[in-house]
Image (tube, rainbow, N blue to C red):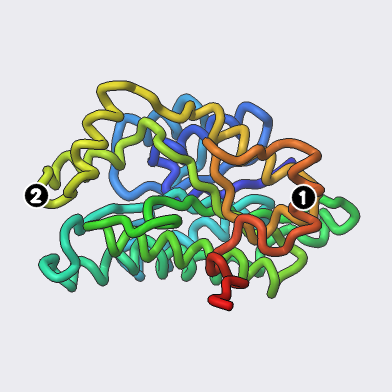
Amino acid sequence: MRNAIVFSASSDIGAALCKNWKEAGWNVFGTYRTESKLVDELKVEHQIQMIHCDFSDIESIKNAYTKLKEKCFYWDVLVFASGIMEPIGNFEEVNFDEWEQSVSTNLLSPLRMLHYFLPQRNVEINSASPIKPTVLFFAGAGTNNAALNYSAYALSKVALIKTCELLDAEIPDSKFVIIGPGWVNTKIHTSTLQAGEKGAGSNYQRTLQQISEKNWVPMEKVIDCCNWVINTGSNGVGGRNFSVAFDSWGTKDIEDALENNSDMYKLRRSHNSWSSK
């Protein structure tokens, strides 16, 4: 039986993963920052063991780790589904203390928790299996362009992309992957609406249009991508950044391509071989 810990299980994607894996017979543990109907649902209806954890508070992170370690002696899957977009606005104008806290919450706090939990990864029991312990992060805006007015959030997500490549190379007995879910209908878009056009710039109108057209990436597709990443035995999957909406994940062809291309779906300079000659 697999053990999974979902940090920020009270997020929409986190909750969906918890429900999917619980239905599959896994032991699932999750964290939440604030009480809500969704947290109650996960606890009562789905029997997810939930622990309070505020990623903006180091003591809360330490307390959550201690409690989770007592309940979950080893893990097969770690998921970091936390993320805040604030502060939204021009870098020059935002409150830098809030900006710094956002980077800490989105980047440093998850890595602190990962550092705590790495010794508990299930490498002994799975030593004869091609399926490695898997750490999943989620990417966001700013991977392929300059996400104006979202610098703290974008910087954190881009840093996590590189982190997955670095850790996957350093820790070969495990798999580190980051997934870009795309436009999924989740609560995170509320931050853009609250910032308004003055704070969010052109992304405000884009978000309004997305909500109006309801052209969302289905949550089921996000879950399927996560499960493919976890269950594939391909050595080429680790250290990559997958797009749920645009990549042909889930096929033997892509697994073969990844194993033969060490640069694919990683942060790289563009046009490296360009010359004026």
Q: In the rendering, at what x and y percent does residue 162 appear? A: 54, 67
* Circle 1 residue: 257
Residue occupying image coordinates x 37% and y 36%: 39
Work out whether 33 lies above or below 251.
below
Q: Residue furthest top?
A: 213
Q: Secondary structure at mark 1?
A: helix
Quadrant location of the N terminus in the rendered image = top right
Q: Residue at x 25, y 57 (%)?
A: 148
Does any portion of residue 65 appear in the rendered image?
yes
Tell me where residue 262 sits by quadrant.
bottom right
Crowd tier of the residue under label 2, counting other residues whose Cα lies within 10 Å: few below 14, some 14–19, many 20 or above: few
Q: In the rendered image of this protein, does residue 27 appear above or below residue 174?
A: above
Q: CA distance from mark 1 to mark 2?
A: 43 Å
The answer to which of 112 and 93 lies nearer the viewer is 93
As helix, strand or loop, the secondary structure at mark 2 comes to: helix
Rendered location of residue 63, percent (x, y): 41, 64
At horizontal 61% and vertical 38% (from top left) the residue drawn is 225
Image quarter in which the C terminus is found: bottom right
**Going 26% across and 36% down the picture, which residue do you hit?**
207
In the shown orientation, is residue 150 left or right of residue 258?
left
The residue wearing badge 2 is 198
Where's residue 116, x and y in %? Answer: 54, 70
The kind of residue tagged 1 is Ala
The three-letter code of the residue at mark 2 reads Lys
Residue 163: tell me if it is visible: no
Residue 271 drawn at (x, y percent): 56, 66
Left or right relative to 54: residue 20: right
Q: Earlier in the sequence, mark 1 or mark 2?
A: 2
Dot 1 crowding, Cα within 10 Å, few <14, some 14–19, many 20+: few
Front residue of 10/207: it is 207
Q: Which mark is residue 120?
A: none
